[in-house]
Amino acid sequence: METTEATNPLLAIAHPIPFDRVEAGHVEPAVDALLERARQKLTALEQYDGAPSYDASLRALEDLTEDLERCMGVVGHLESVSTTDELRAAYNAVQPKVSAFFSSIPMSAGLYRVLGEFARSDEAKSLDPTRKRFVEKTLASFRREGAELGAESKAQLETLNVELSKVTTKFGQNVLDATNAYELVVEDEGKLRGLPARAIEAARESAKAKGVEGFRFTLQAPSFIPVLTYLDDRSIREQMYRGFNTRAASGQYDNRGLVAEIIELRRKKASLLGFSSFVDLVLDDRMAGNGERAMTFVDGLREKSQPAFERENEELSVYARQLTGDASLQLSPWDIGYYAEKRRAALYDFDEEVLRPYLSLEGVLTGLFEIVHKLYGITVTRVEDMPAWHESVRVYRIKDGDGSELGVFYADLYPRESKRDGAWMNAFITAEHGADGWSEHVGLICANVTPPVGDTPALLSHREVETVFHEFGHLLHHMLSRVSVRSLAGTNVAWDFVELPSQIMENFCWERVALDLFARHHESGESIPGELFERMSRARTYRGANAMMRQLGFASLDLALHAQYARERDGDVVDYARTCMQPFAPAPYMPEYAMVLGFGHLFSHPVGYAGGYYSYKWAEVLDADAYSRFREGGVFSTEVAAQFRQRVLSRGDSAEPMELFEDFMGREPDERALLERTGIGAP
C-alpha cells in the first residue's frame, strides 16, 4: 500500500496533531519514508558546491531532520503514555535505524566541509548573535560527535550509538513492565490502619477494577507513597519498599546486565571521542564544563549539609524509640517516611493530608493559569475539540497579552498501566518566525498525580502540586520562546540550566497570595486557614538536609558510574551503586537494594540525565537565587516577571546560560539562598 500524507498521519506532523488517527501500523512506513527523504536532503547538502551561505548550510541542516524529528517525537511519546504490544514492536523496529541516521550526520565529511566553508565566510562573520552562536555550537557538536574521526572510528561510533539506543529503550520498557507486574492485595481492612481514607478507597477501587477482593496496591506513586508514609503495618511497608527498590532486578525484566552494558557502551563512546569519561563528554557543552567541577559542586553541598543530615537522623531515631518504647529500635528504610511523618505532625501539628481537600486538581490548574496571567499577561483556556491519545488528556490554548496565539499544549496528569511513571514536559512543535509573524508552539506536560476516586475529585498532595507547577515551568520555557533558530529555542538549553524555569515555578506553591488563587476546599470553597498555612510554612524545612542529601546521593552515584566505575575492578553494578548511595541514606539499605535498575533518568535514554543528574541541584542554586528578585519586588511583580520572561524564558539557548542568568540578576549566582531555603543555613 502506498504511503502518502493522506493515508499516514505521521508523514507530515503539524498542528493540530492527529493523535486519533495514529496507529502502530503507520510507524514503520512513515519512518522509512521520512528517512529516505532526509537521506536525499543530506546527500544534496553534502554535494553542495555553490557559494557559502547560511540558508544552504545551517538552515538546510535544520530542515533536513525536522519532519523525522516530529514523527519520532510523536511515536516515542505515544509509546511512553499509551503503549501497546504492537506500538512497542514498531517503535523498537525503527529506533535503531533512526539512531543510526542521526549518528551519521555529524560524521559526514561532505557536510562538515560545507559547514566549515560557511563558518569561514564573510556572511558568517556578519551574522546576528543567535545565528553566529548556532554556527559555533553546531561545529563544536559535530566535533564532539565524531566529525573529525577516521573512517574506522566513525563506523565504531555509529555502532555504539545504535546499541545505546536499543539497550536504553529496552531498559525503560523493562521498568514499566516490572512496575505493572507488581501488586500487593490486602484482604483484611484492619491491616490498613493509619492509611488515609482516600488511599484506602483508591486501593479498593483498584482491586475492583482488577476483579479481585480486598485492597490492591501498586508501585505507582499515588499508591506506593501513602503506604510508606502512613501505614502502621510495618510488614506491609517493608513489602512495598522491597517491591519498589527491587524493580527490574530479576526474571524477564532484569535490568542488571543492561545497566552494566549501557555504562560500558558510554565509556567506549567517550574514549573514542577523546574524553577521559562519559561525564566529561556530556558536560563539555554544559555550565559545569567537566566532571571534576560537577563533583566539586556536589561535594561542596554535601559537606555543608552533612552536620544537619546527621542531626536530623539522630533526632528521628530518638523520637522513634521514645514513641515505641523500644530503646534498641534500629530504623529500617521502610520506617523512615513513617516515623518522619509522625514526628512532623508532633513538632508542627501538621499532616500533609489535611491539605488535600484544598488542592483539587481543577482548582490547582485554575490557580496556576491565573498566576501566570498575573506574571506574564498570558491567558490559558481549555480546548474541547482537539484529538488526544486518551480520554483523560486535556488540551489548552495559550494567548499572549496582546491576543496573539502562542500555542497549545496537552496535559496528561493521571497514572495508568500503559504510561511510564514520573513527570515530564516535551515539545512537539517549535514556533518559527515567518512573513506572517510567529507560528504556534505545541507541547505537553505529563505527571502521575492522585486520580479521582468515586465521586471525590482528584485531590493532590502539596508535593504533587509542586510537580504540576514544575512541569508547567518547563512548558513556559517552550511556549514563551522567541528564538529564530529552532535548535536553540525553548528548552534546548544546557541541562544544568534547563531546570531553572521549572524550579522557579515551584516557589509560588508556598506563597500565601498565590495559594489563595487555587487552594480552596473542594466542598466549602474556603481558602487554607491562616493557622494551617503557618504550620505548613514552619514545616517546610523539616528534614531539609535529608531531602538535599537524597538528591546529592543520586548525583554522586551518576558521576561515579560514568566517571569511575569499572566492572572488572568494582564488581557488580548493583552492589557498587548501593555502596555509593549508602552515605546519603538515613538508614542502612537492605542487601537486595537495587534502585539503580529502575533509575530511568540515567538509563532509559542514550544520554538523558546520565553524567548530569547534578543539574537538579545546580539549577536549584540558580532558582533559589533568582526567585529572591520576585520576593523582593513582590511575588506578582510584573516588572520582575517581564525581565525574567525577556532575559531568560524567551531566549532559549541564544546566549551562554550564565550570561542570561547574570543579565537577569546583575551578578553571578549565590548558593546561600538555597541553603537558607532548605533550612540548612548559609555557612
Image: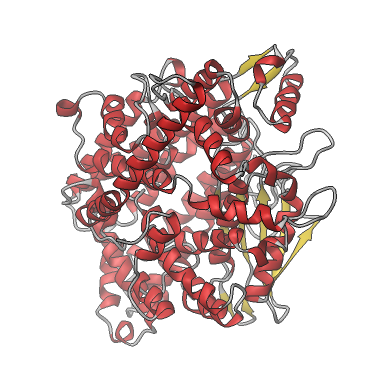
Tell me the quarter of the image containing the N terminus.
top right
652 vs 351: above or below? below
Percent of width and height locating residue 181: 56, 20
For the question of whether residue 640 can be seen, the reply is yes
Residue 440 found in image quarter: bottom right
Percent of width and height locating residue 639: 57, 83
Q: Residue at x 70, y 55 (%)?
A: 364
429 vs 586: above or below? below
Percent of width and height locating residue 462: 62, 48
593 vs 401: above or below? above
Tell me the quarter of the image containing the C terminus.
bottom left
Left or right of 115 on screen, residue 548: right
Percent of width and height locating residue 582: 30, 32
Nearer the observer, 409 or 233: 233
Left or right of 606 on screen, residue 405: right
Nearer the observer, 642 or 266: 642
Q: Residue at x 66, y 22 (%)?
A: 193
Nearer the observer, 681 or 569: 681
Q: Residue at x 44, y 25 (%)?
A: 321
For the question of whether residue 554 can be seen, the reply is no
Q: Residue at x 58, y 76 (%)?
A: 634
Nearer the observer, 436 or 172: 172
Q: Which color scheme did the rendering employ for the protein? A: secondary structure
Residue 669 found in image quarter: bottom left
507 vs 600: above or below? below
Residue 570 found in image quarter: top left
Left or right of 416 on screen, residue 499: left
